[in-house]
Image (cartoon, grey):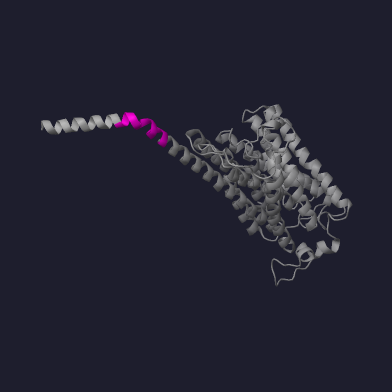
Amino acid sequence: MKRLTLKTGVLSAGLLVAAALFSPQLHAAEATADAVNAYAIDNFFLFICAVLVLFMQAGFALVETGLNAAKNTVNILFKNLMDLSIGAILFYFIGYGLMYPGGAFEGGWFGFGGFGIGSASSEIGAGVLHPAVDFLFQVAFAATAATIVSGAVAGRMQFKSYLIYSAVLTAFIYPISGMWKWGGGWLNTLGFHDFAGSLVVHALGGFAGLAGAIVLGPRLGRFNADGKPNAMPGHNLALSTLGVFILLIGWYGFNPGSQLAVVGGDNTAAVMIIATNTTLAATAGAFVAMMFAWALFKKPDLTMGLNGMLAGLVAITANCDAVDYNEALIIGAVGGILVVSGIKLLDMLKIDDPVGAWPVHGLNGIWGGIAAGIFGGKPLMAQLIGSTAIPLWGFGTMLVLFGILKAIGILRVSREEEMKGLDISEHEEEAYYGFEIFTTQ
């Protein structure tokens, strides 16, 4: 027993000596493994969120298609496809460098950080993003901003002019104003808060769409000679409803993904709170829009409920990281009222926005920015300035662009082409082959 005890004591002493000698290396290896795991988890988290935001393109395509005439289906689907395709290429070459020019342009209005994506850092750890996944996430946002306009100009805009618009917005207009906040520009220095893009993405696209709708003019038959609006129902509300649910799912990449990390107690908690606020605002927007429209029109209207859900989502996007659950419900509820009121306002002004792009994204984008000041404790003056500057930038630049396209005669299709439908007149393709579509216009 004594010999066994002696051997045990010698072995224990040896292990203690080895631990003392090699513990720094063991701790370093542990730290490296933790850093690698955190890096992998955060980057994979953002990759999944980027995919969810890209999936929103499908949602927009279905919403816009269903809310418009069947004879324009191919045209709408094609525009959404090119928003992503042209947008990704131009954002890679130009837009990404404009939006994230680097610290030398901090506090400024404009800068350029170079072409392409850039090389990865040698640092590995929590919160460190590979430039490629950061690009994927950001380019999905750029495509979202561009495709908002598609619905506002549906049914009467020439396809080639739409491609010009989409290229200009994703390469220059969106990245420049995006830099003002997310690239460290003057709005960021001012203290303006837009967590996931109520203004940077949605209000920009919504006001760009408003400019397009104004310059194009309404669809044939949308308003009578006395100014009274005529309803022009969409051809497939099942598609639109599915599209809204897809957008809701995609928004869980849009908002929670904007935390840019999930590792660590603070990040994990923030992601879950943001996701819950997003849900509450969306559902409050849908319910209140339904009830408000029901009171106005004496019947429950599905399209108002759908747009109400989108309005709640847009309104919570700027402030979802800074408000509590009850405030999220209030923000979404106000969004539901605003979207119905905005649609009525456009009818009064004889502005034809077939899908309600401006009430959903423009009007509620502004509300989201202001709500960050009212409920989120952000500097109210900074919120008011940012919530004015970005919409004005989007509206003003696109008013000029659409005006130029109109002046050179390539903005709107002819009366005959519009009556026939853009699928046939612009693409010589039919989405629903075998059905003959008659028009009374």
Q: Quadrant of the N terminus?
A: top left
Q: Is residue 206 visible?
A: no
The quadrant in which residue 324 appears is top right
* Magenta region, main secondary structure: helix
Q: To which quarter of the image does residue 393 belong?
A: top right
> Relative to 85, does residue 323 appear above or below in the rendering?
above
Residue at image position (78%, 52%) is: 164
Give the residue at the far bottom of this rendering: 434
Q: Which residues are magenta?
A: 18-29
Q: Is residue 21 magenta?
A: yes
In the shown orientation, is residue 131 left or right of residue 94?
left
Residue closer to the observer: 56 or 325? 56
Taking depth in this image into account, of 123 and 252 the one nearest to the observer is 123
Q: Position of residue 378 (x, y in %)?
A: 64, 28
Seen in the image, is 279 located left or right of residue 185?
A: left
Residue in view at x 63 percent, y 43 percent:
313
Residue 247 appears at what percent x and percent y? Answer: 61, 50
Q: Is residue 190 one of those drawn in magenta? A: no
Instruction: Give the left or right position of residue 319, taking residue 67 as reference.
Output: left
Q: Is residue 4 visible?
A: yes
* Residue at left offset 74%, top offset 61%: 72
Q: Picture coordinates of residue 166 (x, y %)?
A: 74, 50
The part of the image, by quadrant, that contains residue 433 is bottom right
Q: Quadrant of the C terminus?
A: bottom right
Please state the horizontal and vertical placement of residue 357, each as a whole percent of the image: 72, 48
